[in-house]
Amino acid sequence: MTIDDLSQHMAEAGSLDRAAVPLGLFLAWCGNLHLVSRSFQEAHEGPLLRLRYRELAPTEFLTTTTGGSLDTDHLSEEGRSFVASYYGAYLDDLREVFGGDLYGVKGDWSAYERMAGVVTRRYMDWKNGREVSSPGAGALTRWWRRLRS
């Protein structure tokens, strides 16, 4: 089952490169935290290794491995459970971190680092049984600034 794909972002993004940013950042995070399925790992061992060594940008990882979609079979059981609980709020978090523009951000390692802290916090909240829905306007920005100080 498809969770998200590039076609759902094209109208607002305007180009494939820009549409790949939200999915690319998220799939790269899943790959780095070993939340991808065993079959995905086996099929994409090389790109996963290149991702983890940061030789492949998050958006390139998405298009190289999946052709532009995020499907349930790409994820481990734990990954699917987390996505079911969180992915609806992920785009809100992305907007919060990047000032409302999902598609004006480069799908590079700098953007990944900014978003990975937020998604990891959500993941840890989820693992500890806490709610992972969006925190409301400004809350993530304030949290992120505290991390950087």
Image: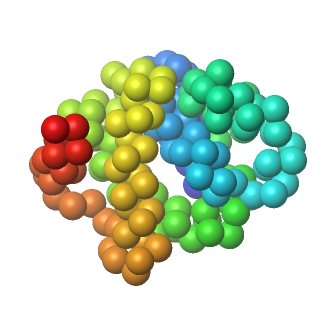
Q: Is residue 118 visible?
A: yes
- x and y percent of residue 70 in the render? 63, 47
Instruction: Using the rendered image of the protein, determine whether residue 2 is visible from the camera's viewpoint.
Output: no
Quadrant of residue 141 within the rendered picture: top left
Asked if 59 appears above or below 94 in the picture, the reply is above
Q: Quadrant of the N terminus?
A: bottom right
Q: Nearer the viewer, residue 112 or 70?
A: 112
Is residue 148 or residue 106 the one in the foreground? 148
Query: Is residue 124 depicted above or below 21 in this figure?
Result: below
| Residue at figure coordinates x 41%, y 77% from the top left | 128
From the viewer's perspective, tell me whether residue 60 is left or right of residue 37. left
Q: Residue at x 68, y 69 (%)?
A: 77
Depth order, front residue of 40/23: 40
Instruction: Give the percent coordinates (x, y) of residue 110.
Output: 41, 26
- Residue 72 location in percent, x, y? 67, 59
Whole-percent x, y for residue 124 in the image: 42, 66
Q: How many marks?
A: 0
Question: What residue sits 27% from the left and 33% below the top?
Answer: 98
Image colouring: rainbow
Q: In the displayed structure, does residue 39 sit left or right of residue 66?
A: right
The residue at the point 64 percent across, 24 percent down is: 56
Q: If the image is split into quadrants, where does the C terminus sit?
A: top left
Q: Hey, which quadrant is residue 111 in on the image?
A: top left
Among all residues in the image, which is located at the extreme bottom?
129
The answer to whether 95 appears left or right of 31 in the picture is: left
